[in-house]
Image: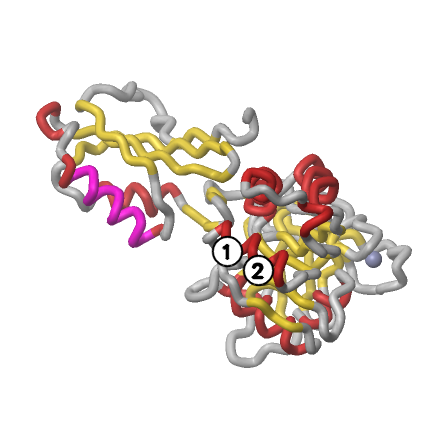
Amino acid sequence: MGRTYDVAGVRRGDVVQNMFGYGLFTGGLGFHYGARAIGATIVPTSSGNTKRQLLLMKDLKTKAVTCTPSYMVYLCEASRAEGYEPKRDFNLRVGIFGAEPWSEEARRKIEDVFGLRAHDIYGMSELYGPGVGIECQNRTGLHVWGDEFLVEALNPDTGEVLEPGKEGELAFTMLSREAMPLLRYRSRDLSKVLMEDCACGRCHPRIQRIKGRSDDMLIIGGVNVFPSQIEHVLMNIPDLGDQYQIIVSHKELDRLAVKAETSADKVDDPALLRRVHDDLLAVLSINADVELVPVGTFPRSEVGKARRVFDLRQKQ
Ligand SMILES: [Zn+2]
């Protein structure tokens, strides 16, 4: 992570505000200790509490910020709503964003509003957390630290190793770790490996920005969510039927809505609503919008699988 910060231009003495969540998530502590390793000053704000984030960002003249790209897009509007003029009131020069896919449009917006340079980062908990790779100043893919990780793209159906430049599922082999070795560990992230020289002079291979997943995992506000986790929660609540829908949308921030069928007399039961909400929160760490609907609301599918997951974010 220290080397990763260095690629983004963060140096000894710079103030880094780490808005990734601390606790049972490798993001917060990975960014924290990486900043300490290069002698930067770390402001461990963790996620949330937007007013305080902005106040500290101004008062401490934060130079670099780290968070999910969707949260930084949210701060574009939130900072103005709080009366700040971002380029005048903040001293941001560098942003390191990751834990979810994001677009070039989001990057342009963040850079225009805050006047910083935005870098995409890659990592996953099984590979130490953040700091597996990052974009250099040329931003032609993310350099993966080739002395630590062997990165390959596989055909997701057959497991066959693909030539560099061909799109597939990224797989990682740890080259130096001893306690938990991983051999061709499948990430389920779709991308391609680029072996050509980079104009920055680094000889570490690059991966293209992540295009999507080869499984059904959703990334909601930087949190990994499998639909099966939601189903498991719902099936353990006796008053619910077995039909449900999961709706993911985006308005300033990602939102998760869960609609579940129950008997007509329970639709407005506040205790049942609270239980569904709290059980989902306990498992996913996400505040979901829960709605109970009468049995028979959702269409039954006679052939094949019922469509239960609706990710509206692309259209929005
Ligand atoms: Zn480069």
Camera sees residue 294? yes
Residue placed under numbered mark 1 in the picture? 52
Residue furthest left in the image: 265
* Dot 1 alpha-carbon crowd within 10 angstroms: few under 14, some 14 to 19, many 20 or more: few
281 falls in the magenta region: yes
Camera sees residue 158? no
Query: Which numbered dot is residue 295?
Result: none
Q: Give SS at disc 2.
A: helix
Secondary structure that dominates the magenta span:
helix
Answer above or below: position of 146 versus 19: below
Q: Give the range drawn in magenta.
A: 272-283
Q: Give SS at disc 1.
A: helix
User: Can you tell which quarter of the image residue 33 is in?
Assistant: bottom right
Q: In the image, residue 207 lies at what x, y percent?
A: 72, 52
Q: In the image, residue 163 lies at what x, y percent?
A: 76, 50
Query: Which numbered dot is residue 56?
Result: 2
Q: Is mark 2 within 8 Å of ligand 1?
A: no
Residue drawn at (57%, 62%), measured in percent from left and top? 18
Q: What residue type is labelled 1?
A: Arg
